[in-house]
Amino acid sequence: MDDTAATTLSGRAFFEHQQERRREAQARLTGQSLPSRPPPPPTVSPPVSPAAVTQVISSVPAEPAAPALQLLVTNSANEGQVFALHPGELIIGRENGSPILLDDLRVSHNHALLRVSRHTVTIEDLRSTNGTRVNGESIRNQTTLAPGDQIDLGGVQLVIEQRQPKRPGGS
């Protein structure tokens, strides 16, 4: 160990280090071998209770659940198409790459914006040509949606639905 490293040792550790160096030097001069040092004791973790294991396992998040809501198109060329409402921002429009792509000229390229979180879904018109209506009312601001709400995008009708869980073995 060089002097710089030695100066970083605290008092007792430095003293013990110096004694070790003296013993090594003495052994080299006399041709004696130093007794081998015992290995450090193994580190043993305290026992873990089954309850603690269960608590840790239950705190690990499960796979993301399927979206609770979906959007069903009820008319136009997209009639019957269903869009799962995943958390995040989803553009509804006829622009290629829109998460909710509707093939109808009455729908603007970027017609409306859905904001989906775990607990709420909102819609906002993006200054579309033909407007956005929720339950027959034109919207100008962000509007909260709920299952059963009817959305009209320039004449294309959609409805918010509760997503039905898939049955095991069924479709």
Image (cartoon, rainbow, N blue to C red):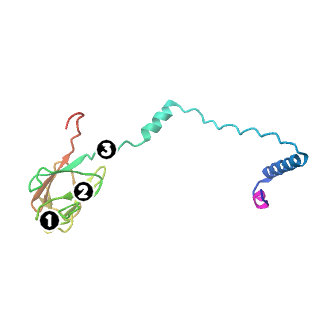
Circle 2 sits on which residue? 122
- Quarter of the C terminus within the rendering: top left
Q: Is residue 24 above or below residue 89?
A: above
Percent x, y for residue 91? 23, 61
| Vertical position of residue 127 compared to residue 134: above or below | below
Q: On the rendered structure, is 125 left or right of 42?
A: left
Q: Mark 3 or mark 2, which has the lower sequence index?
A: 3
Looking at the rendered structure, the kind of residue marked 2 is Thr
Say few, some or many: other residues with alpha carbon within 10 Å of mark 3 (under 14 / 14 to 19 / 20 or more).
few
> Who is closer to the viewer here, 1 or 112?
1
**Disc 3 residue type (three-letter):** Ala
Q: Quadrant of residue 106?
A: bottom left
Which residues make up the magenta segment?
3-7
Decide whether residue 4 is among the magenta residues. yes
Mark linked to residue 65: 3
Whether the residues at callouts 1 and 2 have beta carbons within 8 Å, the answer is no
Q: Are marks 3 and 2 in contact (CB under 8 Å)?
A: no
Left or right: residue 119 versus residue 138 is right
Crowding at dot 2, Cα within 10 Å, few <14 / some 14-19 / many 20+, comes out as some
Residue drawn at x 37%, y 42% is 62
Marks 3/1: CA distance? 33 Å
Front position among marks 3 and 2: 3
